[in-house]
Amino acid sequence: MPVTSSRLRRIRPLALLTLALALALAMLGGQASAGSSAAAAGSLPCDLYASGGTPCVAAHSTTRALYSAYNGRLYQVKRASDGATRDIGVLSTGGYADAAAQDAFCAGTSCLITVVYDQSGRGNHLTQAPPGGFSGPAAGGYDNLAEASAAPVTVGGHKAYGVFIAPGTGYRNNSTNGIATGDQPEGMYAILDGSHYNGGCCFDYGNAETNSRDTGNGHMETIYFGNSKTWGYGTGNGPWVMADLENGLFSGVNRGYNAGNPSVSHRFLTAAVKGGPNQWAIRAGNAQSGGLSTYYSGPRPNVSGYNPMHKEGAIILGIGGDNSNGSAGTFYEGVMTSGYPSDATENAVQANINSAGYAPSSTASGLTVGSRVSLRATTSCCTTEYLRHDSADSNAAIATVSSSSSSADKSAATWIVRAGLGDASCVSFESADKPGQYLRHYDFRLRIDVNDGSALSRQDATFCPQASHNGQGISLRSANYPSDFVRHYNHAAYVASDGGSHEWDTTAFWADDTSWVVTSPWA
């Protein structure tokens, strides 16, 4: 029997009654509100945690309010064309994100998510992660920010956007208020895209070091999601929900393999971790329906340094405690609590999550892995021109291709769609007539090149399709430079930002030049 304070385990009868009523509201009131903008009073996750005696001390979401009385900011976006920012709030009190406000503000350009606001009132906002044990790819060693429209979904029938974490992207707050430290008890959950993951370290959400460096075993307590087997793993091939406790991704009490932790495959995944004095648990389930399963509940790992814990109280999203930033994933909402939540409270929260109505966006890219395609420019000057590689060198460009073109020209303008070499949720383009050579950027210029197996080569050759900037076809975002998109400029091809420092970043025709129609292949 784990040694756990009775104060953590005992719930007074009145609290049980309150929680039972809250659960009823979550199941009935939440369902009633799924098609509307507002939630029933007391029915949202942080209301339920408060009813269970473990209130939220951080609450982050880009899709909806997490308190029934919340009517504030969810997140902030920054526009590439002029650097202006806009806070995105809710449609109504306790409701869903005002995605239309983002769409209007970012129309014809791109936006980055600069802040994910804390709804708890404690000011535990998440912003661009600074360098630490590892440096990020952005200026000053900071991590990249997420592209604001990269993860569209619907919630309760309303359009919303998640936070799309590509390798090199991360958010952090090293100066928090009310987050557990030392061996204090806490809980946390996150709603994630269960199909977007990798084996890099480390796609985490939760409690981490305040100096962005590895300060030893037990100095972290976060939710981890991915298929890394370096420190710990469960059954099958992954991905797994585990706990990052620093210097160890734990799937159970043992370092390494634990049979009770299964691979998960839900498109929308609820992942939960909680920990107190010599007691912790991993729970998870389908965010669209059904309850939570307990993958582990018991004493701290049987490895030195984790009992007692030494939590420091920073909050991270998409990275490890030392700013290791090789991970991928998508985050929609999550909270951290004061105190060790009961299973009953978490079950009530899961019932509300089910009723929230998460669903994939109907946006289609026209890119199917394994298919052959051609990509036509949409700028008025160039609507007969297609993205191709040059005959004389390895550079990419646009050029006119028609039925009377040579077979060589048709083949050079044809691409085979592959799962993204650097992120399987995105795509890579293999040259149809140069097998084994992929479209990639190098010093911002697009070219075809062999995959040398390096992380940089794979990332440079990965592009993420999303809604086009001019309403025609799709736009293709660079996987490792979230504000850069595939663009033609003076007939050459680049990855370009809207209004950046290079000649090819000019704002003139940027929306048109970064929009491509997917057509039948020329060869």
Image (tube, grey):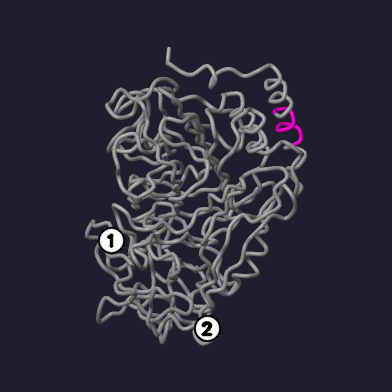
Residue position for label 2: 509
Left/right of residue 11 with respect to residue 150 in the rendered view: right
Toward which corner of the image does residue 352 lie, by quadrant? Answer: top right
Under tag 1, what secondary structure?
helix
Q: Quadrant of the C terminus?
A: bottom left
Give the residue furthest to the left.
452
Range of the magenta residues? 23-29
Q: Position of residue 126 (x, y in %)?
A: 50, 53
Q: Residue at x 43, y 23 (%)?
A: 279
**Secondary structure mostly seen in the magenta stretch:** helix
> Which label was assigned to residue 186?
none
Q: Nearer the viewer, residue 359 or 146?
A: 146
Tell me where residue 518 appears, x and y as whole percent: 50, 68
Residue at 44% x, 76% y: name it.
487
Give the amino acid type for the residue marked by disc 1 in the picture: Leu
Residue 494, image x, y percentages: 38, 76
Q: Observer-nearest residue: 282 or 107?
A: 282
Asked if residue 242 is among those painted magenta in the image, a careful observer would answer: no
Total marks placed: 2
Residue 116 placement, left or right of 24: left
Of callouts 1 and 2, the N-terminal one: 1
Tags 1 and 2 in contact by the CB under 8 Å rule?
no
Residue holding disc 1: 456
Query: Eyeballing the image, is 131 above or below 248?
Result: below
Q: CA distance from mark 1 to mark 2?
A: 29 Å
Please say whether residue 26 is one of the residues in the magenta stretch. yes
Q: Nearer the viewer, residue 320 or 224?
A: 320
Q: Amino acid at mark 2?
A: Phe
The picture quadrant where one finds residue 259 is top left
